[in-house]
Amino acid sequence: MRTLAKLIFLAPLALACPPPAFAQSTASPDAAVAGPSTTTGTTTADRETYVQTTRDDLSAWRGKLDAFAANAKGSASEAGSAADRALHSAWTEFQVASDHLESVGADGWSVAKSSYEKASEDLSAAWRKVRPEQL
């Protein structure tokens, strides 16, 4: 029963995350928690730099969450806890916001950037609830 509960929680993460061999960055997961620094301009070069930083953040978070999933040992209630579900939801929103940031044009840049930053903050908060000692 515990294994089934873990699979129910971890399967969506595993399907959404490619294996670490496909990661795009070697950035430390701890460096990615706060998200990329805010850019002052909205030139194409600024946006490209910011998007690359978000890719690094996404890769770092993917590594943290993969490690968390691999080390998940505990009861079925732990695998299905509200905090775990919130973490999964925050991760999904973070991925969506990151993808949107890469595809948005200059007109929607500021809204997409704000959405990404909020998703990054929400993911950090969800992570602190699940793993307060590892931020």
Image: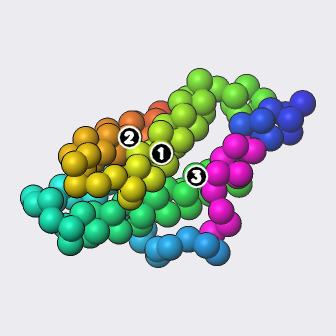
Q: Which residues are magenta?
A: 10-20
> For the point 47% across and 45% down, which residue is it?
96
Q: Which mark is residue 96?
A: 1
Q: Secondary structure at mark 3?
A: helix
In this figure, which residue is indicated by the disc labeled 3? 65
Look at the picture and state if 12 lies above or below 50: above
Q: CA distance from mark 1 to mark 2?
A: 9 Å
Residue 131: % across, % down = 51, 42
* Camera-side residue of 33 and 46: 46
- In which image quadrant can residue 94 be found? top left
Label 3 – label 1 distance at C-alpha? 16 Å
Q: Circle 2 sits on which residue? A: 119
Tag 2's secondary structure? helix
- Please name the amino acid that badge 3 sits on: Leu
> Which residue shows up at 46% across the image and 58% down it?
58
Instruction: Check if mark 1's residue and mark 2's residue have beta carbons within 8 Å.
Output: yes
Residue at the location (47% across, 75% down)?
26
Question: Is residue 133 shown to the viewer in this render?
Answer: no
In percent of width and height, residue 97 lies at 41, 45
**Foreground residue among 69 and 115:** 115
